[in-house]
Amino acid sequence: VGCGCGLAVLIDIRTVAETVSTNADMRTLARDGVGEGTWLRAERQSGGRGRLGRDWESPAGNLYCSTIVRIRPGDPPPPTLALVTAVAVHQAIDALVPGRTQIKWPNDIMAGPAKLCGMLLERTGDAIIIGIGVNVMAHPQIADRPTTSLWALGAVEGSAGTLIDSIALVFADTLHVWRTYGLDPIRVRWLAAAHRPGTPLRVSLPDGEVLDGRFDDLSSGGELILRLDNGATRAIHAGDVFLV
Ligand code: BTN
């Protein structure tokens, strides 16, 4: 299919009723040599996984899918695919609930304080497995954080089955931009879709340190730039970010 960028891409979407985790299945497919453009969707997952070792509750009605990117020499840094994915999924979601959602670093999609979508990127060999979970009909609670769904936000059309079609198409286009022009145009799109600078954030770092500040910027390498309450800025590579 044409992806809007003048490029013809092959998109192969495979749907199963249930699996443990589409990311785990995509890892196996990666070892078997599947190429970019392959997507796997499950209607339910019995062992869905989230970031930072969390579970991702996966009842029927939501979108659970994974795809693969094969890293090529000269590609921008692979971790920045988190930003590519967030931009692409946000664009597909924004078509259903215009102006209602924002990206939260690195790649959650929120409606105000409530989480709508999460993504999990994992590396295996030369492949990055990208898993996406979007609350379409149901919104299970995640620990003590608020969550929402497209249905709760008033989306009048769109099911998991149609949303994956548009995500796959926009993702192919965004990946092409990343490969051809680098991170800069992705960063611009990410900033346009993210919370406004000045938004209060709390960041929990992997070593347990907790930082309070405000969203300032996204660095040219994709790090979160946090302006601390004392006026200094910190570049964050990894961590858990809360809207406060
Ligand atoms: C997060 O913690 O925000 C990331 C959630 C990622 C969930 C998706 S659902 C499809 C894919 N398969 C998984 O087991 N996890 C990801």
Image: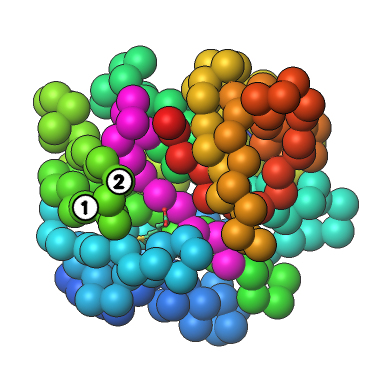
| Residue type indicated by callout 2 | Arg
Q: Which residue is mark 2?
A: 145
* Mark 2–mark 1 CB contact (< 8 Å): yes
The answer to whether residue 85 is above or below residue 217 is below
Q: Is residue 181 positioned above or below 25 on the image?
A: above
Q: Amino acid at mark 1?
A: Gln
Asked if the magenta segment contains residue 111, the reply would be yes
For residue 25, say whether it is visible.
yes
| Residue at image coords 52%, 77% | 27
Report crowding for label 2: few under 14, some 14 to 19, many 20 or more residues within 10 A (C-alpha): few
Give left or right: position of 209 versus 109.
right
The residue at the point 52 percent across, 21 percent down is 199
Q: Residue at x 14, y 48 (%)?
A: 138
Q: Nearer the viewer, residue 5 or 199?
A: 199
Label drawn at residue 141: 1
Residue 147: % across, % down: 25, 42
Mark pair 2, 1: CA separation: 7 Å
List x then y, in percent, for residue 151: 14, 34
